[in-house]
Image: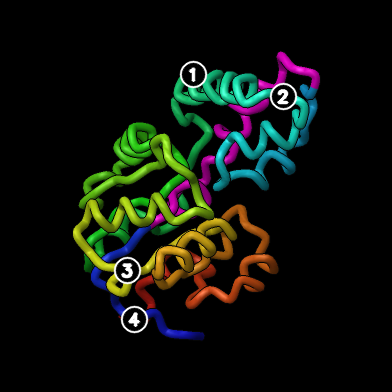
């Protein structure tokens, strides 16, 4: 096992890394799709898009749709998702304890909007462990590096001081593009073989393993 050294700052994905939120995310998407020509898209398929922008999913499902039609579906999702109140979302084992014990600055680098990320971290008692919360607000989402770059600016740190922790290929690609070391987690929504093929710097099979070398 490659030992993860301490970093001055940590950038965390949220869905599939800190929280098992797929039931609520996919449930909200299914509610949107119920009023379209694609009402029966399997849960397993929807889950593979977590970590990517919703526009990717809706564009792939409805290739003939205009950007305005796709955006309308995204906006419908954004209305439905918070109404679920994250009732089917759970914390991964050891997340609060690990964040509390992990020294260094902490921020998020999530595809969720910043307001949504802040709300869910607050609901699950995690926001107190973060020095900054950064979501994707009107700029390109991962695998583009924008959210990581903004998160680092929010903390006032440089790429070489940071470690990105995430469960998806877009997390790894965004970290590479931002010049940040990256740790993949194998317990989330990403395909482990696809993650390993990206050759992440570090690997976690459980969140508390982030502290294993401390």
Q: Which residue is mark 1?
A: 79
Q: Is residue 15 magenta?
A: yes
Residue 190 image point, x, y percent? 62, 57
Per the image, the residue denoted by label 3 is 159
**Which of 155/79 is in front?**
155
Task: Please identify, in this view, whether the residue under mark 2 or under mark 1 is nearer the observer.
Answer: 2
| Span colored in magenta | 12-37
> Which residue is drawn at the image coordinates 28% and 72% (left, top)?
161
The answer to the question of whether label 2 and label 3 lie on touching residues, with beta carbons closer than 8 A, is: no
* Numbered disc 4: secondary structure: loop
Mark seen at residue 65: 2
In reply to whether residue 70 is colored magenta, the answer given is no
N-terminal label among 2 and 4: 4
In the picture, measured across the screen, residue 212 lies left or right of residue 56, that is left
Q: Are marks 2 and 4 in contact (CB under 8 Å)?
A: no
| Mark whose residue sits in front, 2 or 3 | 2
Quick check: 97 left or right of 141? left
Q: Residue at x 75, y 28 (%)?
A: 62
């Amino acid at each position: 096992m490659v030992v993860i050294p301490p970093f001055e700052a940590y950038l965390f994905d949220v869905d599939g890394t800190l929280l098992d939120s797929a039931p609520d995310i996919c449930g909200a998407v299914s509610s949107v799709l119920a009023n379209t020509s694609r009402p029966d898209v399997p849960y397993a398929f929807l889950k593979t898009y977590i970590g990517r922008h919703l526009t990717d999913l809706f564009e792939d499902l409805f290739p003939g749709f205009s950007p305005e039609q796709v955006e309308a579906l995204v906006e419908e999702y954004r209305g439905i998702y918070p109404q679920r109140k994250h009732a089917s979302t759970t914390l991964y084992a050891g997340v609060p304890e690990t964040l509390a014990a992990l020294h260094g600055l902490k921020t998020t680098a999530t595809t969720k909007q910043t307001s949504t990320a802040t709300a869910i971290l607050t609901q699950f008692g995690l926001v107190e462990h973060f020095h900054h919360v950064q979501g994707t607000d009107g700029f390109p989402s991962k695998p583009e590096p924008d959210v990581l770059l903004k998160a680092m600016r929010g903390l006032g740190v440089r790429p070489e001081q940071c470690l990105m922790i995430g469960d998806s290929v877009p997390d790894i690609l965004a970290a590479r593009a931002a010049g940040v070391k990256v740790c993949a987690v194998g317990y989330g929504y990403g395909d482990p073989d696809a993650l390993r093929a990206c050759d992440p710097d570090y690997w976690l099979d459980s969140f508390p393993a982030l502290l294993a070398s401390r």
